[in-house]
């Protein structure tokens, strides 16, 4: 019986990681135990199905991946975070946690650190605007009003929905996190119209005695 063969992309990834682990390509050393463990994990879990290798690809770009957390939290509504975004669940968790803590502190500067520029802002009437840094500073209290700050304080990675190549969003698209050029997820869209719609859906669910979480 002919054994399953890994796809070429995975083979290249494994070769690249092996080279990174050793000063001589193809040789294993114990000089960097963390990278050695990562190599062993990649080799053990590589799959013939390219879709199963998204986390492995993401880990190959990281110095110290959070393997246990990423395995446990990769699957969300819409698919795998790693496949949809090219980033790991732990990277999104770090961004979500920073947003949550910043909103709870009420620190404008800390919130803005997690926001990408230009920011796509959709008003409660549906008007779409791309805000520069100066415009966002001027409109901060409108963009991040009490309702949006409340959403930020309730962010939970398990409630995120992903769309392939688009990023991750919360509560019907009220807030979108997209991986920027540095590889970090940042808030790139604030949609107050969607937040109002999400609130209406939540009220209707409450009236029907349903408790399904919005995404």
Image (cartoon, rainbow, N blue to C red):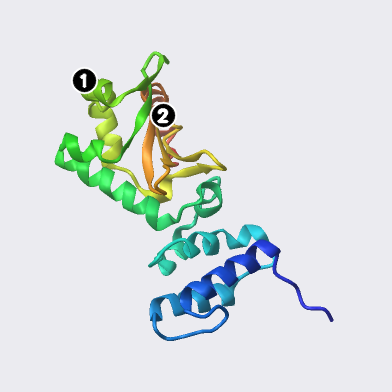
Quadrant where the N terminus lies? bottom right
Rendered position, 97 above or below 189: below
Nearest to N terminus: mark 1 or mark 2: 1
Tell me: 207 left or right of 138. Answer: right
Task: Compute the Cα span from label 1 to label 2.
Answer: 26 Å
x and y percentages locating residue 23 in the rendered image:
47, 79
Tell me: 141 left or right of 28. Answer: left
Q: What element carries label 1?
A: helix
The image quarter containing residue 108 is top left
From the image, tell me which residue sits under label 1. Answer: 138
Return the residue nearer the eye: 184 or 100: 184
Quadrant where the C terminus lies? top left
Q: Which mark is residue 198?
A: 2
Return the residue nearer the eye: 183 or 46: 183
Task: Residue at 47% x, 61% y: name it.
Answer: 61
Q: Residue 196 carries which label?
A: none
Rendered position, 67 above or below 90: below
Task: Find out whether the residues at labels 1 and 2 contact each other: C-beta distance under 8 Å.
Answer: no
Task: Residue at 52% x, 38% y: name it.
Answer: 166
Q: What element carries label 2?
A: helix
Return the residue nearer the eye: 197 or 104: 104
């Amino acid at each position: 019986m002919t054994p399953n063969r890994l796809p070429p992309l995975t083979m290249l990834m494994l070769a690249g990681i092996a080279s990174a682990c050793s000063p001589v390509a193809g040789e294993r050393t114990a000089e960097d135990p963390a990278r050695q463990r990562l190599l062993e994990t990649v080799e053990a879990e590589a799959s013939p199905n390219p879709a199963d290798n998204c986390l492995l690809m993401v880990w190959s770009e990281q110095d110290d991946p959070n393997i246990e957390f990423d395995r446990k939290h990769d699957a969300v509504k819409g698919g795998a975070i790693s496949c949809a975004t090219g980033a790991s669940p732990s990277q999104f968790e770090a961004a979500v946690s920073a947003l949550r803590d910043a909103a709870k502190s009420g620190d404008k500067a800390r919130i803005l650190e997690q926001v990408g520029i230009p920011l796509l802002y959709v008003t409660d009437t549906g008007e779409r605007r791309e805000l520069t840094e100066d415009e966002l500073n001027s409109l901060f209290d409108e963009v991040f009003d009490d309702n949006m700050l409340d959403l930020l304080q309730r962010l939970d990675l398990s409630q995120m929905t992903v769309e392939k190549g688009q990023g991750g969003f919360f509560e019907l698209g009220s807030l979108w996190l997209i991986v920027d050029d540095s590889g970090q997820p940042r808030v790139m869209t604030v949609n107050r119209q969607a937040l109002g719609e999400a609130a209406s859906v939540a009220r209707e669910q409450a009236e029907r005695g349903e408790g399904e979480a919005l995404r």
